[in-house]
Amino acid sequence: MPTPLLTGLVAAPFTPFLSDGRLNLELIPALCDHLLAHRVSAAFVCGSTGEGTSLTDAERRQVTAAWVHAARGRLKVVVHIGHLSASCARELAAHAQEVGADAISSCAPSFFPIQSIEQLVSVTAESAAGAPDLPFYFYHIPALTRMELSMVDYLHRAGPAIPSLRGVKFTHADFEEPLRLITYQNGHYEILGGREQMLLAALATGARGAIGSNFNFAAPLYHEIWSSFQNNDLPRARRLQGQAIELTLFFRRFGGLRAMKAVMAFLGLDCGPVRAPLKPLTLSEKKELEIGWQQLAQSTPTLSMPTE
Amino acid sequence: MPTPLLTGLVAAPFTPFLSDGRLNLELIPALCDHLLAHRVSAAFVCGSTGEGTSLTDAERRQVTAAWVHAARGRLKVVVHIGHLSASCARELAAHAQEVGADAISSCAPSFFPIQSIEQLVSVTAESAAGAPDLPFYFYHIPALTRMELSMVDYLHRAGPAIPSLRGVKFTHADFEEPLRLITYQNGHYEILGGREQMLLAALATGARGAIGSNFNFAAPLYHEIWSSFQNNDLPRARRLQGQAIELTLFFRRFGGLRAMKAVMAFLGLDCGPVRAPLKPLTLSEKKELEIGWQQLAQSTPTLSMPTE
Amino acid sequence: MPTPLLTGLVAAPFTPFLSDGRLNLELIPALCDHLLAHRVSAAFVCGSTGEGTSLTDAERRQVTAAWVHAARGRLKVVVHIGHLSASCARELAAHAQEVGADAISSCAPSFFPIQSIEQLVSVTAESAAGAPDLPFYFYHIPALTRMELSMVDYLHRAGPAIPSLRGVKFTHADFEEPLRLITYQNGHYEILGGREQMLLAALATGARGAIGSNFNFAAPLYHEIWSSFQNNDLPRARRLQGQAIELTLFFRRFGGLRAMKAVMAFLGLDCGPVRAPLKPLTLSEKKELEIGWQQLAQSTPTLSMPTE
Amino acid sequence: MPTPLLTGLVAAPFTPFLSDGRLNLELIPALCDHLLAHRVSAAFVCGSTGEGTSLTDAERRQVTAAWVHAARGRLKVVVHIGHLSASCARELAAHAQEVGADAISSCAPSFFPIQSIEQLVSVTAESAAGAPDLPFYFYHIPALTRMELSMVDYLHRAGPAIPSLRGVKFTHADFEEPLRLITYQNGHYEILGGREQMLLAALATGARGAIGSNFNFAAPLYHEIWSSFQNNDLPRARRLQGQAIELTLFFRRFGGLRAMKAVMAFLGLDCGPVRAPLKPLTLSEKKELEIGWQQLAQSTPTLSMPTE
């Protein structure tokens, strides 16, 4: 079992835009420092939280380079290269390797239905081949890609076919497959939980890392869940996990991602609006969100707990 | 928080048939003793595992009476009364109360789509009203009923409307709702896990009871998962949970329920065939199942571990 | 190609209830005369429109007998016997034959998923066997049963296995299968359209009969669509079909079946409320429905066109 | 009602690749002549049949330019610009206008779920704005995009917001919406059928144009269906439509698109393999396909009927 590359909390950062919709690359160093200050171990950039598929490929390269440059080795940078076109994905992978990212990841293409493991292995192999030196993580997120094939079957076939395969980001409400994945070949692969609202179940199942959007603004809460779990204080872990679910429900009321991104402004890190096909918050939604957020922050001290 | 009625392992027994398809009521005392010998705390009869919906109402009454009679208070008897017709469900509830069952349960009717909590509360209230003295558990199983409304919303509305409401059997791959349900009103309701292959995640989430078909023939394995969890030996709990998943996968290869029922014969408790619309095993499938089962039993000592 | 039993408009009558929810059998003769006056050729009783699955089996028998008695051979009576329990379905079939119904029909049981044609043939064969002398129509309605297997494959396997198989009621938005079914074995089977809002497409495809709930209160409109089609006046047929769609949309706004049933009262044939799990209209909904209905009737003269 | 731009058979051409996977632009003039010889009125390029989303944007531009150049006004060229990134879609639209295409079209982005008409209007408006002078057709294909919002609602909201909106390509098995769309605002919009296997139902419903992949290799059959319909010879139209369905089933056996593309080689127009995530045919599949195709062509004379 190799030493895992990705452990603990991995944040999936928002891609910062100016109010006119163009990239705001200059905010990235501050976002990076913010994550470091909150003991986040890695950034998963240009993923679904980062609206990677809503960017042009040139923009994805700029965001990638900016994160690698800002990180300076202090946190790992994992670049999501998923694309409907495998050629484009491969080029994004090559670029990630070239600029010095630590790893790449790709979800399944979401247009033509993927109906066999063979197809999935083939398209991810083609994409990952652009960065032969970087560990590759498959990003399993059926809610967005509708690809629901077994990840155990994927590891079985992709293992020999993709030498750089290092693990799976598992963003799905199921704990049968994760346990099998975590123990597959004596724990050879890194299986990262992708649902913050079920972190406790993921930890019980054996996950050693988790990737999430909430870690951008609420890492302290999740660190506390984790340490409570490790200290065998399950009642406290459950209570805190309950608070994390409240957080999820709070954002869900406002449409999820679009609201989480807007919250960054309340922390002094204004990431700007979301792009189509997501819908930016209206002014009155923003106001309502801010009031709700402040109430939530007050009633959830762990949200903004001072970091060690 | 009242003392819970249902804790630990609750088995959902198979309904025993003769080879010609008629009820084999005479086997029920032996099935009951078998569960008791394996420290199963209650029997959930005429549920999906018991093919309740494939029985006539007269047969459901006979099975119910036979279990109550066999149990003699040594294990709890929960009667599933779910029916497409609320009138029939209500009559089944009344009968369960009359013969001395300990509780009733009902899933959502699976024909007309249930589109609002109001509808769900209304139809379950009508059903549960047949047994006003028995605790009522809603049986949430979207894979069969396709009803996916929020159980938190259900408790919120059904609590005041159904005085006998005591909890939810949650048979769904999700751990966001269960944590909310378990902590709802300071743990006022009993939330029972319904997926054996995720027992560990359910325990971490706070479940104090679980209902399953596997507990008919593999209770020792699940007791071991539970005690490992309680002893904070998570590595062992995960290893055993992995064995439980292998068990699930083994039966899935043979079509699930139809094969689990057939396994009872290997334990000397032949429950006969399944009824339409399920398809009984062919002779060669039965043979293959038996060989597979014996191999599995040898490689999984906890499956048949001697009981305390 | 045998002479078809079911042609033209076949109405699926509502089951009349008293305001306290009990059967109102005494209204059935008037409902029957109403259908006859509107040149409806047959009644499909105890189907989804008739809330058959929400009745007790005793009630289904009473409704069946009342319709056969009222019809006196003047219109055909097709009895829906579909039931989660194949034994119960078989007994309902036997009863239908005994009292002199013209045909039986069954949808797929909606609880355990039907995953193979073999299963579907087996369960429908068992049900249909209760009435060996009555033509059997399979009722395909995936929106309610979630069974989506190919009906061509079904005819292929059920043809030899169910001697009484006479056709399919096809209630699904697809016109690839219907054309294949209609021409299967040179038109050996009767394929009845089950979606009024697509009657024109069904006729173009070759359907010779259609079953619907709208024919209870709007048969004249559908007769006009049919005759326009036969007279090759497609522009008129489309205009009228557009009106039929407006009708569908009107009821959909009020939740469909529950509102259609309520409309009967405006025709002097009060069928009472719907049963759980459907939700009866509130008084204010009823009022709003009545106003809307009257407006619709005025703007759609064909709705209440005098019959020949 | 403006004169429609797209009528009759519109083919969605395959994008020709060399055996190494690079574009084979040189084949496009021959493909274009082939369509013209078969009285196809327009080419819908870079759509799903053209694997548009599997191409790089640069390649999409090359294919577009090659088609416009080959067509020389003899057939219309409609360019599919759908892209996960609205910016990229907009640039593709601008390019299509610049090189002289006749129209553009876009499906819904398939990654983030589109949950409101407002979102859909917003993202398509942004895309279409790149080509303000070209008619825009929304491409509705829920089987690939999972976007199932009402197209009537879309026209209602997009009409005022997208001045260039000209119609909808409706690729879905439903004939309730198409009839409403066709008659919407007295037929102001062009509604093109997108399912060849239901052409007859589409014609009955009032469609004046249809877009399909089959028109690449089987246009004569569909011309015959069309003329039979226009001559009121419905029995013949149905018989031919039945042959068209056989064609659909034939390709479905081989996985659909990947096999249809391979058939072009049998007509002397080798379009090469498909790209990931689709899977090219193996040699033995190709052989089997060829034998099957030849049998089909012999038993379906209209497939290769001489053109007028």
Image (cartoon, coloured by chain):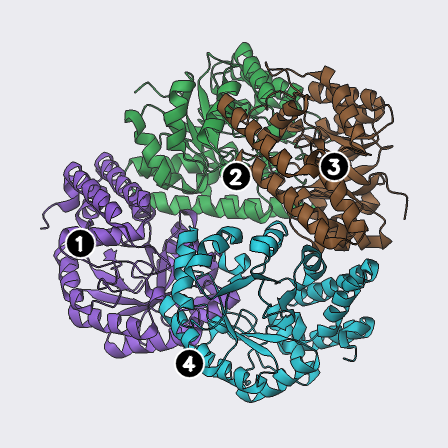
Chain colours: A green, B purple, C cyan, D brown
Disc number for residue D220 = 3
Rounded to the nearest angstrom, the CA distance separating label 2 from label 3 is 37 Å
> Disc 4 residue type?
Ala
Q: Residues within 10 Å of mark 1 (few under 14, many from 20)?
A: few
Q: Residue at x 56, y 17 (%)?
A: A90
- Name the image quarter holding residue D204: bottom right
Marks 2, 3: nearer the viewer: 3
Which residue appears at 57% of the width and 33% of the height? Answer: A110
Query: Along the line of sight, which residue is nearer the eye, C291 or B6?
Result: C291
Chain ID, mark 1: B
- Check disc 4 and report the residue beneath it: C58
Return the residue at label 1: B265
Secondary-structure class at tag 1: helix
Work out whether residue B48 or residue A193 is closer to the camera in this orientation and state it: B48
User: Is B139 located above or below residue D80 in the figure?
Assistant: below
Mark 2, secondary structure of its residue:
loop
Secondary structure at badge 3 equals: helix
Q: How many marks?
A: 4
Q: Nearer the viewer, mark 2 or mark 4?
A: 4
